[in-house]
Every structure is written in C-alpha cells, then in structure tokens.
C-alpha cells in the first residue's frame, strides 16, 4: 500500500527543487470513483495527490505529449526536469521512449509506484451505477474496498480488476529514481491465449469480426492521443501529401488507419492498454497490438520497453530470421 | 446438362487478378528483365513498381495496394547475403513476416501477401514466382474486404 | 520545377519488339487522355537519333518539363534518355521510363492483355513523373590510385597498363607468388610459346615498376567507401621471413626438416616441398615463405634442437616473431582479377580420379610436361603413394616407365548438368590439342587418343593448330566416355565412337582428364567485400553481357580475366587491358559523379529516434543537434557522399521525415494507386 503522506512528502521535496519544473501525478477525478492526472507546479499543490487503484492513466504519455512552444528570441528553453509517477506498466513506456532517444534520462525524475493492479472503470460503473458523489477505491489484500456515500463495500479483486492486470508481468517499475512503495513480485503471466483463440478462426470469421468492430470507429484519434508511443508532431496517418489513407469515416479507411497504427507500434507498444480504455466505441484495440506483440516475442525474442540500451526491433535483423513464407 | 451450364458460368466468372509487385532494381527487376530477354512467357496479371532495394518497401504499401483494389501484392528482392546494399532484404524479411501474419489475423488471406527472392540471373524463377502468386490469388478470389469505396457522386 | 507538369509521353515500337504485340496507336491515344500529358507520340526506335530528337524538339517547342519514355527496361536506356533531357536543357531526373518491352511485350503473347498492361504501366509512369524533382549530381574527387585484387596474367596486365599511364597501383595477391595459373603452364596454344618465358618478364616488371606496390601473400580484408574514394584494408600475412634480408638463396629450404615431405600446391600435388619454400624457381618475389600449418616449429612448437632453416640462413632473415601487418590506403578504382579453380575431377567418380595413379587432370599433366616440373618435363607413368623400392647395392635405379598410350577425355566438369556446370569452359579443346601435341613430342612412340563431344577451335590460329595436331597422328574419337576401370594392369576407357556407332573398351596407360574452369571456392570472400553479383554459372556478373563486359553493377569496380568467365590467355589480357582502360576513365578525369537519388531529412518533423541511423548499411546518417523554434533537439542528417540510395531508411522512418529522392512516398503511393485500381 502506498503511504499517501509519504507520497505527498516526496512530491513536495521534488517540486521544491530548483531544477524541477513540475510533478505529474494523480488526483481525484471530478465525480464518482474516477482519478485524473495532476500537474503540480507549486509545493502547496501536493496535497491533492493520491494513488489508488483508480489511478488507471498512463502518465508517461505526458512526457512526449508536452507541447514545445516556440522560445522567444534571446531566451533559453526551459530545460528543467519533469517528475512523473509511473506504475510498472507505465514505466515501460518511459524505457521505450528512452530507447528511441525521445529525451535524455536526466530530463526525468521518475517516481516509481510498484502496483498490484488497477480497476476497470467500466466494471466499477456496472457494479455501482450512477454514483455521482466522489467515492474512493482501495485495495486491501485480495479485495477492493469501495467507499461512497458513507458506505463501504468489499468486492473480490478479480471482479473489478482491469484485464490487463490479470496478465501483468512488470508490476514494479523497471526504471525509477525513487520507489514510493515496496517492490511487488511478478504475480501473473501472459500466454496470449486470447490472441491464439482469435488466430484459430477462419479467414471469413476474422474479417467479419474486425469489419464489425472497425466500422464503429469514428476516427476520434483518442487511441493515438493517449498512446505514450505516438508522439510524432505530424502523424503520417493524417497527411495529405503523401496520403496513406483518407480521413473519411468508413470501414475501409478506418481499417487502414488501425492496421497502419498497429504496424507503427510493432515492437514499440508496451501493452499499457490505454488505447482500448479510452476508445469511446469499445473497439478492442489491444487485440490488434497484442498480435504484433506476440509475433515479435515469438519470432524475434524481443520485448519493447525493457532495455533502454537495446536497438529498436525493426532496425535489427538476424541472418537466421524465419523465411519459410518466401518463395 | 446442368454440369455444362455450371462450367460455362464458372469460366464467365473466372477472375483475372490484379497484382502489384515491388521489385528491387539490382536483383529481381533484372531477373524479370532477363525473363523478358529470354522471351519466357507468363501471365500478365502482375504490375511492377521499381525500387532500388526491397528494404525501401514499406509494409504499409501492401496495405495501401490492397485497399486501392489490388488483389495481391508481391515484394521481390535479392537472396539473403546478396543484397546490393548489403542488408536491405534482411529488414524487408522481418517487416513482411510481421505484416503478413498481422494481415492474416485481420482477415486478409496470406495468399495475397507474397514475398520472393529472385536474383538477376533467375529469369526462369521469375516466371514460376508469378505463376505461383497468380494461382494463389485466384484461389482466394477478388480482394473485397476493406477495399476503398469509390465515390461516384 | 515551377508551374504545372507538362508531360511528354513517347511510346517506342522497338521495331516489332513492342509494336508486334502492343497496339501502340491505342496506347498513345490512351496516354493523351491522362491529365497533364501535353503530347503523346509513338516512333519506331526512340533510342535512335531521330527518336531522341522528337523528345528534344518537344521540350524546346512545347515547353515540356517531364518526359515518360515507354520502351525497354530502364536498366537498358535510362542513361541514354537522361542524356537526351540534359542536352535539351531539362534536368535529367525529370525522366521516367515505362518498361513495356522486357516486362510486357516480350513476355505476354496476348495482345489485348499486353496492350492493357502497357496502358497501366504508362499511367503509373505518368503519375510518378508528375512528382519528379530536379536533382543535382554531385561530383567528388577521384583518388588517382587503383587496387587490383589478384596477380595472375589478367591482374598483372591491368597493373602494368595503369602504372604505365602514371597512376599508383596496389596489386594484392593471396598466394606467395604472382603469376597465377599461367605460371603453371608449359606451352601455350596455338603458338606453343613457353608460358614462363612470356609471363616471367611481366612478373618481374610488376615487382619492379615504380608505380606498383606489390603485396603478395596478402588478403584484402575490408573495402569501404564509394567510387573515387575507396578505403582499403589489406592484411599482409607474415612469411616469418624478413623480405628485406632474404636473398632467395634457398639454403633454408634445403635444410628444412620437412623438405620433400609436403605436397607442393604449385605442382598440383605431384611434387614435394618443405615447410619453408619458394612456390617455383622463378617465383616473384623470390622470397621464401614459412607455411605455418606444416612448419614443425610453428605448428608443434618445436623443431628439434633449433629450427634448421634459421641456422642455415646466413643473412638471418628468418624470424618466427614476425606478425601479420595491416596496411590501409585509399584508391579510386578497383579491378577484380581473382582467376579460377580447375574442376575437381573427384566429382566425376566414374573417371576414377584419385583411385588410379595414372588418371590425372590436365593441370597435373601440365606440370608433368613442364621442364621445371616434378618429372623434369618427362611424360612418365606415376606411382603415387607407392614407396620407392630401396636401391640394392650395385643395382641401377629402375627407369621410370613411359606410357605406351595416353588418352585424353574432354569436357570433364563442363557442359555437364549433373555436376552443375552447364557452360563450356572454352579453353579445354585447345589445351587438350596442345597437350596431345606435347605427348607426341616427348613420347613419340606413345599412342595419343582424344575422346571429345565437339572440338571448338574458334580463335586465331586455333583451327590450324587442331589440324596440325591431327596430322601428327593424334586420334580424335567422338564420344563421351562413361567410365574408367582397370583390367589386367591397364586402364580401360569405356566409350562409344558415336560417328561409327561402335562401343569401345579402349585400353590405355594414362588418362588425362580435360577439366573445366570453375569459379574459385573462396569466391564468397570477394563477393562479400564488394557486393558482387554472380551469373547463373557463378562467375562474377558483368554490368551488361554485350556492352559492358568489364564493368560491374558497382561504379568503380571492374572485372578482368577468368573470374568473369572462362577464357584463354589472349582474351584475358584483352579484357585486362579493357578493365584498366575503364578504371582509368575516372582517374584521368579526376572527378566522378556520385549517386543523386540519395535520402534527405525533413528536419521539422524528424523526431530524432535514430531508427534510420541504425538501419543504414553505410553509416551515412547521423543524429545532429538542431535548433527547432528555440529548442535543442536531435534530428537525422544524411551524408550525401556516403549515401548510396537504397531507401532502407525511408521504410524504417515512422514519421515520414526521411525520404529518398526519386523514390519518395509521395512519388510511389500514386503509382500504387494507378496500378492497384482496376
């Protein structure tokens, strides 16, 4: 369990430093059980910081998402550090960003939070519908304790746990300057059985499945916006010259968009699952990314977001790479 | 009587695939040229785009070609170890292995996404590659799934 | 180019090569309907003078700013038409070719399908042409030096020509002496010149020439760079002999404990040497070499009390502490003249090579008839592996037996699909005739028979020589033997005389297998260094079989000699001189144009991830710090002199920031659309 006072103390220490611009953490959401990101600029603001199983967001996306405004003439850019709180899965995004040289390690002050799992908000809202007052979620042992309206209810962990946490292999952040709790040992494995099931279907079934899902896409680009690995300033998938796909909302263009984005994430997606979480049309985007993830692990023995010194997957090759599909 | 009618129908709907191929200049394009110089005959279904190296070919070209209406895509380069630019074909191999598996997973038949190694002296092999790819695409029929809808206002 | 594209489309008939299958008029009508096409014409031979004039006139009179030529493969005439554009004042990179011959009219008999396909191909060329850009071909200086790999007759000849012209030559030879296979020969056809007599003066020249730096017993380890600026690394293997002190006296070889025990490669295993040796008496350089595999001191750590060679050497040249030396230098051009191996006759087990002592290859026989060879030029029966009978007191040594009949078998390992060599080795008919003549000369009583499939006597003086040899009594029997076996102590060649349809069992004392010429077994090393291609016969591939026989696909790298394909000495010399001349073109002009279709980075969108840097095979890209709106960020930057235009970086880039000129995504994607949409 993260000691909330210790967390706030550390945050206060950090933001008080001269060389730190902001601390990115979590604070309670605007209603219900939600949590939302916090951007602490002053030491006094640390009191709103929390960490609970409701803190689902991957804050690593803000590191690369941050807009670099033009620097006025004669001034130097603000090169102060950014402190960020990351769970185990989130930390892999930082590692992968560093593998891609998005920034130097010294730019970050990483406050790692070993995590035992977060909730799936849809499951919480289904179990406790229409809760508008602010509520709290806590994890005690193998039960979630849900408090709201003066009441407390215990729910089995499995019922509300996010699916991605059931296959979490990196509960403890892989990189950090400080850990805000004790390390958590790996408690799950990922056997890609969900992908294998999908792989076994017939070609017609596969396309019928994806056609139904991808025709719902409204091209809101929430998946791309939330993804910590999507940080190109001018995404190729939106360009007109050259035009890879149209921006029109129909199953053909939507499919092209999702195939292209998934391919761009091959060997880069660190499985944080945010894209699927934020999709307003409930498209199982992770089922696309996980297919690439599985093949990359099987064929090329590579896991993104684990080693900042590693070479990116598609910039390497082996003379022994499989080629039985080649005439 | 009924059987003959069916056969006639089959040949009427006999489908002539349209296949876009990316050939590397030094090996496969030269090999295809050699097939020409040797007057080796093969089906006309393949349209070639010349690139300098198979390593230039972005897997998203495959997706794009299929979306535009191609029934199949072929990428052909130098044999491993013989790439004119040393290693382009190794990268191509990795990229296409992943893309082909992924497209199959989404419902696009693997017969539509083909890769081959054809060297500058393999004119005869080029013919075999074309025949095999055309046969494969014929067997899975026209590309329909996520083909771009043409706007006819 | 400013303004709208004004594209000219030229459809070539190529005589009937294209027009015989493709309806060129229909294709031209179609081309005229494509937007931005200002004019579309057809003509019988676009590459001819009047054909090119059509283009030049239209550029001038109609203000064309892009040209599409629908004809043969760009690999054929892209350069031709680029020059046409240049001559008309249009940047040569505004050309796009549509291959409707090699990849259309020549391979599809169906006229309708071929015409339809031609239209699609031309449309794709037009959409690409719309988006072509003017490119600059940069010039770089050329280092006035050449590297020649291999010092056989071809390498030697190229070296002498280039050195005589005043350029520096680095001549690198793998073995301990120059001369190659020609040094092993006795007489050469058809003039019966003594091979050593015509070769050794050139060998000496090459060692003494002030412009030639000769490196024998050396290997090229690494080649980097591009035409005009190659960085070469050579490993000079150590001979364990200080060449400055060695006088070539030979005392060491006589003293060597292994003298007479090691099979001599130069004699094709028919003669012996010691662990310290000179390959042959006229070897250049005349410096001894210690073979570290067979030297007792080097291989086993101990040679008796002390190495005998060292004791015998008066100038004290032998030094077991000497190490390999790596030298590095720059050259402008490279000639590959690595020669060949002879066919391994053991791959034809029916000929019992290696089984019977007196079945020999032509090269072994060549060493036998050579006056400075292991038998002193005498044709004698061999007793390999048999220990010499100890001479009893007073007894005279048994005189070596002279064979009563010698039989030659042509086409061993050539024109033979079963061993993977379909080609004809070109020299064997003539060298067989020559060797047959030498047998008649040295063993006049011996009966000489040649089993042949065809006799190819195509060169100057060849037919006359073949005639002469037959008149000397050499019997030619047309038939490829099926096997050789032994009966009653004699070798028997089983064959059929196909001209009389008579099966034969021809008894003979000695069989000489006319083995063909094969690519060297260590070919791979040079291929990897230079990215050479191979023809289907596995010899190195020339740039064009008719018009560019000494060039390779890589600028600045040339071929000379048998490494490019089997040929005899006059042809090897001619090609070597041709390669030297070709190599001198960039060196004389001092400048050479480098690849224009290089990659370029849009530094406003590059996210500095370095994927392209990792992927580039030539290290041509690096990350540099740039100032983007006040922020210090990294972006990729291409060194255009090193970039060879492969485009691997473009496919690796996720942000679309790095693009390859002439093969940009915005140029290729419209092509995909034009070809993909039915």
Image (cartoon, coloured by chain):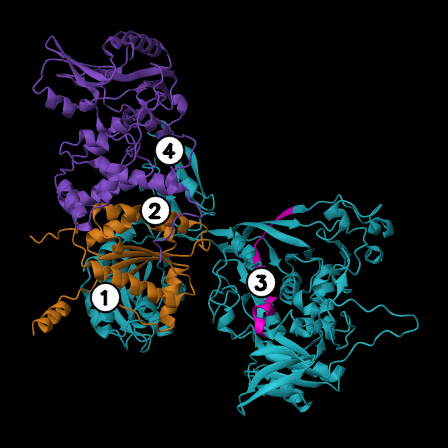
Could you say which is closer to the camera, residue C650 or residue A73? C650
Give the letter of the chain under mark 3: C
> Badges 3 and 2: C-beta atoms under 8 Å apart?
no
Q: Position of residue C422 (x, y in %)?
A: 49, 72
- Look at chain B in the picture and name its colour: orange
Give the letter of the chain under mark 2: B
Tag 2, which secondary structure? helix
**Start-end of magenta stretch:** C327-350
Tag 3, which secondary structure? loop
Residues indicated by labels 2 and 1 sit on the same polypeptide chain: no
Residues indicated by labels 1 and 3 sit on the same polypeptide chain: yes
- Measure the C-alpha gap from mark 2 to mark 4: 18 Å
Q: Which residue matches tag 1?
A: C119
Q: Which residue matches tag 3?
A: C520
Q: Which residue matches tag 4?
A: A100
Q: Residues within 10 Å of mark 2 (few under 14, many from 20)?
A: many
Q: Which residue matches tag 2?
A: B95
Give the label, 2 or 1, closer to the camera: 2
- Quarter of the view holding residue C120: bottom left
Decide whether residue C345 is among the magenta residues. Answer: yes
């Amino acid at each position: 369990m993260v000691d909330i006072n210790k967390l706030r103390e550390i945050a206060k220490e950090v933001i008080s430093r001269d060389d730190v611009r902001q601390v990115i953490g979590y604070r309670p959401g605007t209603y219900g059980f939600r949590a939302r990101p916090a951007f602490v600029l002053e030491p006094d603001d640390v009191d709103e910081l929390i960490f609970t199983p409701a803190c689902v967001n991957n804050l690593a996306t803000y590191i690369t998402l941050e807009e670099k405004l033009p620097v006025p003439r004669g001034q130097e850019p603000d090169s102060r550090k950014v402190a960020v709180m990351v769970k185990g899965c989130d930390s892999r995004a930082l590692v992968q960003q560093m593998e891609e040289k998005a920034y130097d390690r010294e730019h970050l002050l990483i406050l790692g939070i070993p995590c035992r799992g977060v909730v799936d908000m849809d499951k919480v809202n289904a179990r406790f519908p229409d809760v508008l007052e602010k509520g709290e979620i806590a994890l005690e042992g193998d039960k979630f304790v849900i408090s709201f309206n003066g009441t407390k209810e215990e729910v089995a962990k499995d019922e509300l746990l996010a699916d991605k946490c059931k296959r979490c292999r990196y509960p403890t952040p892989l990189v950090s300057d400080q850990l805000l709790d004790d390390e958590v040992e790996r408690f799950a494995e990922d056997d890609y059985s969900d992908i294998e099931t999908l792989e076994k279907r017939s070609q017609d079934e596969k396309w019928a499945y994806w056609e139904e899902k991808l025709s719902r896409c409204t091209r809101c680009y929430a998946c791309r916006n939330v993804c910590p690995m999507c940080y190109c300033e001018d995404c190729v998938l939106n360009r007109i010259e050259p035009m890879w796909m149209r921006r029109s909302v129909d199953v053909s263009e939507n499919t092209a968009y999702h195939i292209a984005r998934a391919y761009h994430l091959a060997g880069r997606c660190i499985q944080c699952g945010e894209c699927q979480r934020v999709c307003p049309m409930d498209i199982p985007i992770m089922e696309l990314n996980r297919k690439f993830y599985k093949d990359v692990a099987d064929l090329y023995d590579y896991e993104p977001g684990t080693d900042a010194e590693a070479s990116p997957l598609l910039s390497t090759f082996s003379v022994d790479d499989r080629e039985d599909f080649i005439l | 009587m009924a059987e003959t009618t069916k056969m006639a129908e089959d040949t009427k709907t006999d489908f002539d695939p349209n296949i876009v191929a990316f050939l590397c200049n030094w090996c496969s394009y030269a090999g295809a040229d050699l097939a020409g110089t040797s007057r080796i005959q093969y089906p006309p279904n393949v349209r070639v785009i010349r690139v300098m190296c198979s390593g230039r070919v972005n897997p998203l070209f495959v997706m794009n070609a299929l979306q535009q209406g191609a029934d199949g895509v072929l990428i052909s380069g130098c044999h491993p170890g013989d790439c004119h630019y040393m290693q382009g074909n190794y990268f191509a191999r990795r990229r296409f292995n992943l893309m082909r598996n992924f497209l199959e997973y989404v419902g696009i038949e693997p017969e539509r996404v083909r890769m081959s190694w054809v060297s500058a002296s393999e004119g005869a092999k080029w013919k075999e590659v074309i025949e095999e790819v055309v046969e494969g695409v014929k067997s899975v029929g026209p590309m329909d799934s996520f083909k771009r809808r043409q706007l006819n206002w | 180019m400013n303004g709208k594209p004004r594209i000219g489309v030229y459809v070539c008939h190529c005589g009937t090569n294209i027009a015989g299958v493709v309806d060129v008029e229909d294709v031209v009508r179609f081309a005229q309907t494509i937007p931005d096409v200002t004019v579309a014409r057809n003509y019988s031979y676009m590459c001819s003078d009047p054909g090119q004039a059509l283009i030049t006139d239209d550029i001038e009179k109609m203000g064309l700013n892009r040209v599409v030529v629908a004809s043969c493969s760009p690999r054929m005439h892209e350069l031709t038409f680029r020059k046409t554009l240049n001559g008309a004042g249009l940047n040569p990179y505004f050309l796009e070719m549509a291959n409707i011959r090699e990849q259309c009219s020549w391979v599809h008999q169906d006229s309708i399908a071929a015409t339809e396909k031609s239209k699609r191909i031309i449309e794709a060329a037009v959409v690409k042409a719309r988006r072509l850009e003017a490119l600059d071909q940069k010039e770089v200086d050329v280092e006035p030096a050449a590297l020649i790999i291999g010092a056989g007759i071809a390498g030697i000849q190229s070296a002498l020509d280039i050195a005589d012209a005043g350029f520096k030559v680095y001549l690198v030879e793998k073995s301990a002496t120059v001369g190659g296979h020609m040094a092993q020969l006795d007489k050469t056809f058809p003039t019966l010149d003594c091979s050593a007599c015509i070769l050794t003066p050139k060998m000496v020249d090459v060692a003494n020439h002030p412009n030639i730096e000769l490196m024998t017993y050396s290997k090229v380890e690494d080649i980097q760079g591009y035409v005009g600026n190659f960085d070469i690394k050579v490993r000079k293997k150590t001979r364990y002999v200080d060449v400055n002190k060695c006088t070539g006296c030979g005392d060491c070889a006589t003293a060597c404990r292994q003298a007479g025990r090691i099979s001599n490669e130069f004699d094709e295993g028919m003669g012996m040497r010691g662990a310290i040796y000179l390959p042959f008496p006229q070897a250049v350089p005349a410096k001894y070499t210690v073979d570290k595999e067979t030297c007792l001191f080097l291989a086993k750590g101990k040679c008796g009390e002390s190495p005998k060679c060292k004791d015998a050497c008066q100038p004290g040249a032998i030094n077991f502490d000497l190490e390999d030396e790596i030298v590095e230098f720059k050259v402008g051009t490279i000639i590959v003249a690595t020669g060949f191996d002879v066919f391994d006759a053991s791959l034809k087990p029916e000929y019992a090579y290696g089984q019977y002592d007196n079945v020999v290859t032509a090269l072994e026989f060549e060493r036998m008839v050579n006056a400075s060879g292991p038998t002193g030029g005498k044709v004698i029966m061999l007793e390999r592996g048999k220990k010499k009978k100890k001479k009893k007191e007073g007894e005279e040594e048994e005189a070596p037996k002279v064979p009563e009949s010698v039989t030659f078998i042509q086409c061993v390992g050539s024109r033979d699909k079963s061993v993977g060599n379909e080609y004809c080795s070109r020299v064997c008919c003539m060298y067989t005739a020559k060797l047959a003549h030498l047998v008649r000369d040295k063993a006049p009583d011996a009966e000489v028979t040649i089993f042949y499939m065809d006799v190819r006597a195509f060169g100057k003086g060849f037919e006359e020589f073949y005639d002469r040899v037959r008149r000397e009594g050499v019997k030619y029997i047309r038939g490829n033997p099926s096997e050789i076996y032994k009966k009653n102590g004699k070798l028997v060649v089983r064959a059929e005389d196909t001209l009389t349809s008579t099966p034969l069992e021809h008894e003979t004392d000695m069989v000489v297998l006319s083995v063909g010429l094969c690519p060297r077994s260590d070919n791979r090393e040079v291929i990897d260094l230079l990215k050479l291609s191979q023809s289907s016969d596995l010899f190195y591939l020339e740039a064009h079989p008719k018009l560019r026989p000494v060039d390779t696909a890589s600028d600045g790298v040339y071929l000379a000699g048998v490494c490019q394909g089997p040929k005899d000495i006059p042809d090897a010399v001619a090609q070597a001189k041709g390669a030297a001349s070709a190599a001198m073109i960039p060196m004389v002009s001092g400048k050479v144009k480098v690849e224009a279709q290089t990659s370029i980075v849009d530094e406003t969108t590059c996210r500095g991830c370095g994927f392209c840097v990792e992927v580039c095979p030539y290290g041509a890209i690096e990350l540099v710090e740039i100032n983007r709106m006040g922020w210090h960020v990294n972006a990729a930057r291409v060194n255009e002199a090193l970039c060879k235009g492969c485009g691997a970086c473009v496919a690796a880039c996720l942000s679309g920031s790095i693009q390859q000129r002439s093969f940009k995504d915005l140029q290729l994607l419209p092509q995909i659309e034009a070809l993909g949409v039915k």
